[in-house]
Image (tube, rainbow, N blue to C red):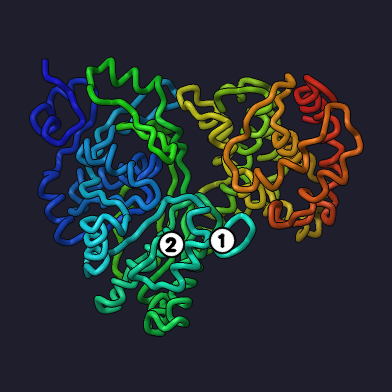
Amino acid sequence: MAELKLTADNLSSNKTAWQEKGYRVWSYNREAVKAETLKNPEWIHFGAGNIFRAFQAALLEELLDKGIEKTGLIAAEGFDYEIIDKMYRPHDGLGIDVTLKANGTIDKAVIGSIVEYVTVDPDNKTDYDRLHEIFASPSLKMVSFTITEKGYSLKNAAGEIAPGVAADFANGPEKATSYMGKVSALLYSRFAAGALPVAMVSMDNCSHNGDKLFDAVSSFAKAWADNGLVSADFVKYVEDKSKVSFPWSMIDKITPRPDASVEKILLADGIQGLEPVITSKNTYVAPFVNAEECQYLVIEDAFPNGKVALDKAGVIYTERETVDRVEKMKVCTCLNPLHTALAVYGCLLDYQLISKEMENPVLKRLVERIGYEEGLPVVVNPGVLDPKKFIDEVVKLRIPNPFMPDSPWRIATDTSQKVGIRFGETIKEYEKRADLKAADLKMIPLVFAGWLRYLMGINDEGKAFEPSSDPLLAKLRPYVADIKFGDTDIHDKVSPILSDATIFGSDLYKVGLGELVESYFKELIAGPGAIIATLKKYV
């Protein structure tokens, strides 16, 4: 019986054995694809995590198998270099994509489209020189990113320019060490190679993601030019859309942390060497990813050097206005707010799986009301996707999928960075409309009250828990630290949070919601069991 290991040599010699175990394995010549990629790279992606391996890499895998594309993906990791060194290199860039379908079936595929993988590490001369070579290549069409929204930020939690960024501004592209500084330095190499065209495509799950990337890169270009470190023509290059584009995109695919139950399935197939790695930066990576079947990627059609034929694999290329409508539909109404609501209350009610929460009729009703009743009235139909059908799929298929091992704790990460987008935009739309007003909202304020309760780090049974990581935890938790069960005099303690427009998108008191959030919160802290009782009362 053949040994099955996730390496290029093993796949080459045991392809049939893998297929007999139910794995889809590429039919293209991977070595030829690799050779062409090394010679004429077309697509490099920053952020070598799960979403990239389950989505972008799988899309290109399909196109390579169909003979539509001839070059593979280059994975670049600029935050946690160990992902490349301890996971990509030992497995020759290969990964197993396990799709968990709502009907209980699974689809297993070995993904071979990632044929090159590098760290964005200036101290690794081989990798860093190769990155500059890639960026200087005329063939490069797309530089894409999934580095999370905070990856584009040049400021710290206090709103000040981060020390590493300030140092990069002063030292120039040759000595850049911050993430966006290194990306900007690589783009400078492309400018120096002849102002070659390229699309810089953020595929992160945040509003107007292309603008966030542009703002970061242009800030570096301007700072370097102002300091006499680069020519002013570099600034013009970055700002010239016919040379460098920063398209908006909307991405949607749930890819939880690699789950032990999925690992068991693969082990039962006899696959060896599946041990996960927890890096020194606490990143959990495994040779496989598990993801849902549903996926959406809508990208503004702005590619000055030509585009990868992703539309042949289900991606929608369209104009910026349509991307904006789709993004607002999903991020502000039809999915992300529902997830955040379940994350906050899931942690408070000690749920370990999002799907399990949907078995609770009160929580199910909460997200249905947020989506259908409060969100849908202000959604503009983007045309390429129907909002109601999207929510139907989310509520009936995606979130309840028992085979998606996603946790409230994962989704609750960085909630302070999300609520302004996921709920704040809906509040703004209510304020704009003549027939609606924000004060009519009831469920969204209940989520805000739940978040205040979550910040206390005390669950519904009165037991302490550690909230998920969030850049504002250290700032926000002291406001609620002294609040006890039964307290009613809480205005002075919570008002600094609820009035903070940088968190919610507006001062909640000015839009008529602050007092309601306080009222809900007082009921949520009445004592053990008050959370579920309050939800039952109002939902």
Q: Which mark is residue 180?
A: 2
| Residue at screen point 22% across, 49% down | 116
Marks 1/2: CA–CA distance = 11 Å
Q: Quadrant of the C terminus?
A: top right
For the residues bearing labels 1 and 2, Cβ distance under 8 angstroms: no
Label 2 CA crowd tier, 10 Å (few <14, some 14–19, many 20+) = many
Give whichever of discs 1 and 2 has the lower sequence position.
1
For label 1, the SS is loop
Q: Quadrant of residue 139?
A: bottom left
| Residue at screen point 35% across, 24% down | 106
Q: Is residue 332 visible?
A: no
In the shown orientation, is residue 458 left or right of residue 74?
Answer: right
Residue 57, above or below 141? above
| Percent position of residue 388, x then y | 60, 42
In the shown orientation, is residue 232 left or right of residue 126?
Answer: right
Name the residue tied to disc 1.
155
Residue closest to the eye, 26 or 73: 73
Label 1 CA crowd tier, 10 Å (few <14, some 14–19, many 20+) = some
| Percent position of residue 519, x then y | 87, 37
Residue closest to the eye, 58 or 261: 261
Q: Quadrant of the N terminus?
A: top left
| Percent position of residue 198, x then y | 32, 68
Q: Is residue 186 visible?
A: yes
| Residue at screen point 47% across, 62% down | 164
Circle 2: residue type: Met
Circle 1: residue type: Lys
| Percent position of residue 453, x then y | 74, 34
